[in-house]
Structures are given as structure tokens and as C-alpha cells.
Image (cartoon, coloured by chain):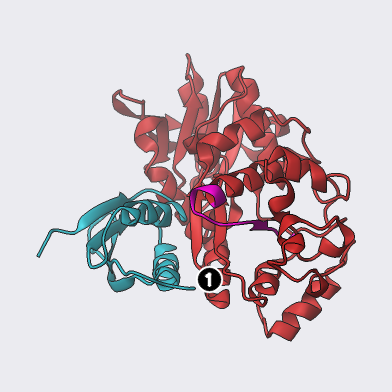
Amino acid sequence: MLAARVVKEQGVHVEGLNFYTGFCVEGHTHAVRAQDKARPKRNNALWVAEQLDMKLHIIDVVEDYKDVVINPRHGYGQFMNPCLDCKGFMVGKAREWMEANGFDFIITGEVIGQRPKSQLKRTMPVIASESGAHERLLRPLCAKLLEPTLPEREGWVNRDKLFDWSGRSRKPQMELAESFGFEDYAQPAGGCCFLTDPSYSRKLQDLWQARGARRYELDDIMLLKMGRHLRPRPHFKLIISREDGENRFMHGYRKQFTHLVPTSHGGPLALLDGEARDGDLELAARLVARFSQGRDADLVRVAVAERNGPERELTVTPMAADDVPREWYVA
Amino acid sequence: MPEPVVVDARGLLCPMPVIRTQDAIAGLSPGCCVQVLATDPGVHADLPAWCRVHGHTLEAIEESSDADGAISAWIRVGNGGAT
């Protein structure tokens, strides 16, 4: 937001790009979970574009992004976050868009030292090089600490009016935001990507381990954001909704999975991902009953609809909380 | 009056309904009408904002009373937007 405004102030025509990887937090949380109802229901990138009176193009990179997550050349951060590869990938996509749409250079809001892996002085040239943007990549907030880029040398932007920020402090950004009259902005410390979330990362690793292959589809990574994930057996796991919002969203997936729902008591929808063998459906029904309003009842009836198969009802004893081994909880 | 181009984004979470709308509109001339069907309530905020920055007119957005709770939005394609 600040970088775009700084360059726009110099009379440069700026348009925004926002890449949708499928791992973005905000779209999911706004749409699904009741606990997020108090937060403003807005796409932050669109909101920023409005504040800056700037067009914003939202680009679906879900397919191409898989290679970044599955085979990061520079490895992962603390969790499953391939931040350096991600940045190179996105700047590369911005370069493609720039070339296709007749723009001259790319700006990012990077600040040297702001992030432990992807925003270091030594990684800045890596991103410029691997993205193919090279000297058409301008970082207005720390430009004075870097070699002049093409837009600066050509006089398209005035280097003197750019900044020399470094380090983890957000104070200069906040001061500049105040000087521009920005009273609201997206959370400056990140947290916008599920791959930086330890619980989500464990679920992704579990998915790959269970499948014996590092691969995913968009539906997989959407469902990793939903519900409790319990893996009682290596060959199947249950995704059990935690609230009405998740229940409604998961309802749309029920035909793709064997699914269970309590009928004698209120309770969650559960999707069974994998293959149910002898006795597994009863075990699954007992687990679902444990998370239903009948958890203390002697018996709970649970409807079980097998994928592409018949629906039937099982009457089971809810599993006691202490009988659910901790290791069954994927996250 | 030509029929609107229909973008079916039901079952998709934001920003996919906006992306599908954006892709559909990219090939249309100013004045064309697009109807967007979605189930993610986030479109109530995102579609109007996207229309504003791209200079399109959001003519209406309403929720159906059907069981699927689909949201319908009608957009008139503009020819400008933010500069």
C-alpha cells in the first residue's frame, strides 16, 4: 500500500496485482467461520486499491503455485512456508503480467531485514534474478540501500524521494501511513498465508504422508482449513466440522466423500477422507458421536452415506474423550 | 436486450467469484451485462469494491430465498475505472 502510494505520488500510473494461491487466510476466514464474523468482510487488496484509487487485478495462480509448495528450491521456513521461492514466483508472475500489459516496471513493498528469510539484502537480488524482473524490480521503501534500478536511472521515478528503511521495526511505515492519512491498513506483521500456520502445516504433511505423494488439489487445501482432523487409521481420516459455518461449507463436499452426521442428536457433519475398511465406519461413527450433543448419551444414531453408495444408520456408543488418543488429532 | 453472461461461482470462496467475474468481463464490451451467482457472502463486499475500481456498475445484488442461498449480482460493464 505504501510502496504503491509513494510511486503514485510521483505521477506514475500504478495498477495492483494480487495473486490467489489457495493458501490465503482472509478469503476463507471471512466466508466460513462464525468466530470471524466480527472482522470486516473485505478483501484487503481490493480495499487498498480503493484507498489508492487504483485498479487491482486478482490472478488465480493455484495450479502454477503447486510447484512452489511441493518443490521449493530454497526450502521451507519455520513451517511449510516457502517464502523465498514464493516471492520469486510472484514477482515472476508480475513480470509476465507487466510484459503482457505494456507496463514498464514492478514495485513491491519489501524492506531489507523485515522478514528473516525472504527479505534480506542478499536475497533481494535472488528474487530479482529468479523472477526475470532484474532491474525492472523497484523496492521504493528500501531503494536507497540497493543499487539504482532501471526506473531510477531512466528518471521514471525520483530516487531522492524513495526510502532507505531496513530492519523489523514497522515504525517508519506507520509514520508514513499517518502522513498519507491512512487510518486503517492490513495487519503489518503477516499471518496472511496458511503455510505459516503450524497446525495447517502439520495437516498438509499428514495429507502427503497418507497419500504417499507430495501432491494436492485446490479442494484438498481448502478442506485442510476446515474442521478437526483426526486420523484414527493410516488409511483414513475424519474431517469433523466445528460450527455451523464449516458445516455449511463442508456440505458442498459431501457427495465426494463418505460422510457421517448424527441423527438422534445435534452434531457435526464429518467427511471421511480415505478408505473405510471393516469396522472403520463404526469407529468413525463413534468419533462423530463424541463431538455431537449426544456425547454423554448411551447411544447415538449416526447416518452414514458411503461415497457413491447407500445410506444407512448406525447406532453407536459415543467414544469417551479420554479414549481418543492424542496422536489421532492431526492438528 | 441481450441475455446477460452468467458467471456461476457457487461453492467458491472469495476471491474466486471475483476472479471468475474478472475473467468473464475481460472479453466483453462496455454496456454488456453479467450476472454472477455465488454462495460466499464475501461477494457482498468484494464485487462492489471490484466494480468501483474497474469502473463497472453493480446494478443489483440480492440473496435468493432458495435452499442453496445463492447470491445474484448484476454488473454492467464499464469502460474505465481507477487511473
* Along the line of sight, the residue nearer the viewer: B31 or A100: A100
User: Mark 1 Cα within 10 Å, few/some/many (few <14, many 20+)?
Assistant: many
Q: Which residues are magenta?
A: A98-109
At x 71%, y 68%, the residue is A157
Going by the numbered disc 1, the residue's amino acid type is Met
Residue placed at 37% from the left, 51% from the top?
A: B23
Residue A235 place in picture, x, y as percent:
56, 18
Q: Nearer the viewer, residue A321 or A44?
A: A44
Which residue is pictured at 85% across the width and 74% down the height? Answer: A171
Q: Which residue is mark 1?
A: A54
Q: Percent from the top left, x then y, of residue B28?
A: 27, 57
Between A34 and A323, the residue placed more toward the observer is A34
| Whether residue A266 can be seen here | no
Question: Considering only vertical position in the picture, is A203 above or below B70?
Answer: above
**Left or right relative to A203: residue A153:** right
Q: What letter labels the chain drawn in cyan?
A: B
Q: Which image quarter: residue A188? A: bottom right
- Which residue, as the protein is rendered here, is positioned at the far left? B1
The colour applied to the residues of chain A in this rendering is: red
Is residue A294 in sight in this rendering? yes
A186 is within the stretch colored magenta: no
Residue A32 in the image, given as x and y percentages of width and height: 49, 56
Q: Is residue A99 magenta?
A: yes
Q: Quadrant where the C terminus of chain A lies?
A: top right
